[in-house]
Image: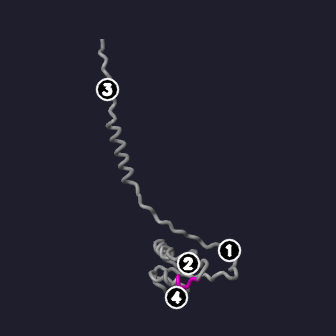
Amino acid sequence: MRKRQARRKLSMTSLIDVIFLLLLFFMLSSTFSKFAEVELSAAGSGAGAVQGETRPMFLRLGAEGLSLNGREVALDALQDLVRGEMPEAGEQPLLVSLQDGVNAQRLIDLLGVLRGVGNLSVTVLGAS
């Protein structure tokens, strides 16, 4: 007659080890940094200017420099110049034209500076 062997209990140690290793893997491979959000509106067709509406400012962004209403401006002085040309009340439209050679990081830097100016409606026109 055969002797019946007693069944061994299953050990949970190896399962817990595997779960712990998976948890470590997913925690270390994930990124927890929060990316900033940049609002961007593209120019589209629309009606003509309404009387009484403020005239938009025009900003031309190049790979090396930028100009506001035809005057060359440094990026760090742009915020103060835009504030100086804004009306007392209401929203001021700003049209941004991109020249050839402008990369995405340069545009994001510009939009980050302009974000600090209140009551400003920024519209990106595209490459010229």
User: Would you say residue 88 sits in the magenta stretch?
Assistant: no
Amino acid type shown at disc 4:
Arg
Query: In terms of secondary structure, where does tag 4 sit?
Result: strand
Report if the CB atoms under discs 1 and 2 are less than 8 Å apart.
no
User: Would you say residue 86 sits in the magenta stretch?
Assistant: yes
Q: CA distance from mark 4 to mark 1?
A: 27 Å
Q: Earlier in the sequence, mark 3 or mark 1?
A: 3
Q: Earlier in the sequence, mark 4 or mark 1?
A: 1
Residue of label 4: 71
Q: Is residue 123 left or right of residue 34?
A: right
Residue of label 3: 8
Report if the CB atoms under discs 2 and 3 are less than 8 Å apart.
no
- Examine the rendered structure and indicate whether residue 1 appears above or below residue 18: above
Please rate how many residues cluster around mark 3, counting C-alpha atoms within 10 Å: few if below 14, some from 14 to 19, many from 20. few
Q: Earlier in the sequence, mark 1 or mark 2?
A: 1
Q: Which residue, as the protein is rendered here, is positioned at the far front?
A: 88
Q: Earlier in the sequence, mark 4 or mark 2?
A: 4
Q: CA distance from mark 2 to mark 3?
A: 74 Å
Query: In terms of secondary structure, where does tag 3 sit?
Result: loop
Q: Is residue 15 visible?
A: yes
At horizontal 31% and vertical 17% (from top left) the residue drawn is 4
Tell me where residue 121 appears, x and y as whole percent.
58, 75
Q: Nearer the viewer, residue 88 or 107?
A: 88
- Examine the rendered structure and indicate whether residue 94 appears above or below residue 31: below
Q: Earlier in the sequence, mark 2 or mark 3?
A: 3
Q: Is residue 33 left or right of residue 6?
A: right
At horizontal 44% and vertical 81% (from top left) the residue drawn is 76
